[in-house]
Image (tube, rainbow, N blue to C red):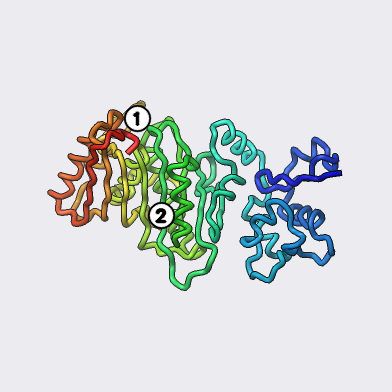
Amino acid sequence: MKIRLILISGLILLTGIGLYSQNQRRSQPTAEQRVQNWLRQMDTDKDGAISKEEAKGLMLQNFGTVDEDKDGRADNSELKELAGRLGGNANRSANQNQNQNRQEGLPSDLAVWKQAPSGVQLELNIPYREGHERWKLDLAMPKKASDKPRPAIVFIHGGGWRNGDKRRGAFLGPALEYAGKGYVTISVNYRLGGPKLHCIEDVKCAVRWLRAHADKYNIDPDRIGAYGNSAGAHLVTMLGISYTEKKLEGDGPWQDYSSRVQAVVASATPTTPRLTVDADYPEKLIQPMNYITADSPPFLLFHEISDKTVAVSNSDDFVKAMKQAGAKDINYHRWEDGSGHEV
């Protein structure tokens, strides 16, 4: 009887011959159980490893990544590392996230792995602090070791501070692409629908987390840049210039580390956003226009003149003020191609 292998959130299940009951399919195994499942399914010579000739399905397709020492076999330690990368002990929250991703048309963990360039390793849904389902990020980095610390890029999605996700194509795609070019990249989720202050606090916490784990991921903490569009552009701009305002750091962990980034790329940037919900803080606290100094990091800005969501005057006024303040590396592309907010 034919057995087909399906990888679901990192778990290979045997289906078609009733080996697993319905209840067993719903449960999530430990990392060790996953390894034993793989060995049971593919280790035909029972030597405790899976050779390329024995590998099947997605294990075969991704064998070059799994076989780290390139000896032609995925041994127990390499399989354990794979199981850990794919989620270790998956919990109910992770399942709910995957279901939500499917409902919203977002790529699953498996789809992200399949989209990743060759030579890129992933760690998905890492919590940068505990307590909220949105406090998670996806990390991508080159698999090949580097003698020197790598630069990092933080990708912040847009969506009007109310919608959006770290796996939207305009953010996930570049994050994976630049990991293939030698960067460590993270794509970050943050709380939605509440005060914009919370969004700022969350992305600052994510950057602090990144610096706190610089040694683990071989990151140069002095070479971290950020990219965002629309609401994400507002947030990365704040990462670049609001580092002196302690009220924006929030109550998250890693407070001994800086949330500042050393370079910013932003498109369709709201530089004077308004308060949309009742808040007990002044509006100017969340507006990039109030943090301009000569010490601003390099900025690369894009805006299209027909943008009806965020008026081009936001970027015009910001760039003018930055240059008047003496900021030394401000590049502004003011487009007239009709792309509007989708610049």
Label annotation for residue 257: none
- Residue 137 lies, in percent from the top left, at 50, 47
**Residue at disc 2, secondary structure:** strand
Mark 1 closeness class: few <14, some 14–19, many ≥20 residues within 10 Å:
few
145 above or below 167? below
Q: Check if mark 2's residue and mark 1's residue have beta carbons within 8 Å.
A: no
- Residue 252 lies, in percent from the top left, at 45, 47
**Residue at disc 1, secondary structure:** loop
Label 1 amino acid? Answer: Ala
Label 2 amino acid? Answer: Ile
Q: Quadrant of residue 339?
A: top left
- Residue 283 lies, in percent from the top left, at 27, 33
Label annotation for residue 279: 1
115 above or below 183? above
The residue shown at (34%, 46%) is 236
Residue beneath disc 2: 153
Q: Is residue 11 left or right of residue 331?
A: right
Residue sitting farthest toward the left? 324
| In this view, the mark in front (2 or 1) | 2
Placement of the C terminus among the 4 image quadrants: top left
Q: Nearer the viewer, residue 106 or 242?
A: 106
The residue shown at (70%, 60%) is 79
